Image: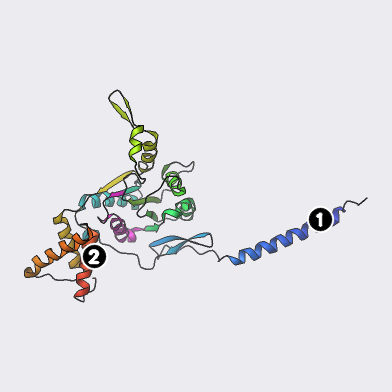
């Protein structure tokens, strides 16, 4: 009959097993890149959340897109609203998470970038996070929550399909975790969808009428529950022809293109034709037209 190993022999075997396991772990860890250091926020104003080898890290943006809010036309009310909210935030006063929704190309993302350009010297910092990485929001906030500066987590062109992991993560980050929200972090998101989710005709069938009141169904309530967690909704609307032409002239000036009075009619005609080919009149199309004209005339952006 075999004897049980002595206590000393068993301890030696266990120590050897642990040593071999540690060796395997060390070799596995060597296959992954080292953890990247966080940006030096004294000198960095913007960063992106990136993944490498399964590890998330903040990658500094060397040259953030600096936009002057005064360069943007036809959105004066929207600019005042987000500027007031950002000014409160930078000053350490209560401020809201912001959802910017509406027509494409009307300046939603540009306004957020303009806030960074305006308030970076006062301690504002911007972190861009892709939709697929919203599940990492708790990790991102944990890295910056003790920093004295103020951070805007920027989610651009945000839309979800049913069941996406980032949807729940964003709901929790906005308002729904057992932990309190970090006082130095806000979320600014842009979307072409008012409630960030697709809306279907069949969902209207869930609506109930109780007396004179209309009660939306559970599907609609669930979709609204995400967007309403943003304290501020800022809506953007399609440009009129006059708004579009005003944006064209503003962007031509930014590129240093001097349009003489005698050329004004020709520029107007060409700019409208340019927009017609794209099926849209917007600030983005105006910028693209101005870039086209500046390039053909050998001008550089100021």
Residue at the (15%, 60%) spot, across then down: 245
**Residue highlighted by disc 1:** 11
In the picture, residue 42 is in which quadrant? bottom left
Residue 249 visible (yes or no): no
Where are the magenta residues, as a range?
100-124
Q: Residue at x 20, y 65 (%)?
A: 251
Disc number at residue 288?
2
Q: Secondary structure at mark 2?
A: helix
Left or right: 84, with 143 as reference point: left
- Side of 90 where 133 appears, left or right: right
Camera-side residue of 223 and 182: 223
Query: In this view of the protein, can residue 163 be seen by the observer?
Result: yes
Indicate whether residue 105 is drawn in magenta: yes
Task: Residue at the far left: name it.
Answer: 262
Q: Indicate the secondary structure of the residue bearing disc 1.
A: helix
| Residue shown at the point (40%, 58%) measured from the top left | 127
Q: Is residue 149 one of those drawn in magenta?
A: no
**C-beta proximity under 8 Å, tags 1 and 2:** no
Q: Is residue 60 left or right of residue 282?
A: right
């Amino acid at each position: 009959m075999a004897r049980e190993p002595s206590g000393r022999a068993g301890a030696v075997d266990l120590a050897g097993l642990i040593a071999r396991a540690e060796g395997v772990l060390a070799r596995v860890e060597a296959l992954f890149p080292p953890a990247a250091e966080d940006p030096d926020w004294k000198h960095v104003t913007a960063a992106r959340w990136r993944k490498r080898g399964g590890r998330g890290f903040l990658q500094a943006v060397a040259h953030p897109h600096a936009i002057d809010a005064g360069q943007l036309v036809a959105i004066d009310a929207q600019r005042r609203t987000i500027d007031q909210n950002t000014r409160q935030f930078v000053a350490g006063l209560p401020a809201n998470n912001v959802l910017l929704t509406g027509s494409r190309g009307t300046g939603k993302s540009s306004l957020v970038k303009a806030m960074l350009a305006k308030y970076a010297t006062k301690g504002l910092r911007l972190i861009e996070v892709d939709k697929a990485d919203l599940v990492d929001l708790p990790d991102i906030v944990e890295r910056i929550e003790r920093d004295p500066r103020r951070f805007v987590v920027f989610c651009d062109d945000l839309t979800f399909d049913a069941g996406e992991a980032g949807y729940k993560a964003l709901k929790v980050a906005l308002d729904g975790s057992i932990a309190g929200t970090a006082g130095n972090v806000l979320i600014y998101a842009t979307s072409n969808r008012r409630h960030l989710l697709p809306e279907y005709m069949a969902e209207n069938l869930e609506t109930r009428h109780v007396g004179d009141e209309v009660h939306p169904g559970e599907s609609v309530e669930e979709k609204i529950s995400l967007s309403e967690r943003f304290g501020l909704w800022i809506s953007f609307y399609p440009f009129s022809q006059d708004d579009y032409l005003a944006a064209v002239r503003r962007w031509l000036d930014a590129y240093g293109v001097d349009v003489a009075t005698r050329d004004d009619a020709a520029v107007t005609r060409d700019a409208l034709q340019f927009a017609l080919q794209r099926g849209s009149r917007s600030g983005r199309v105006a910028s693209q037209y101005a870039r086209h004209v500046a390039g053909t005339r050998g001008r550089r952006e100021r």
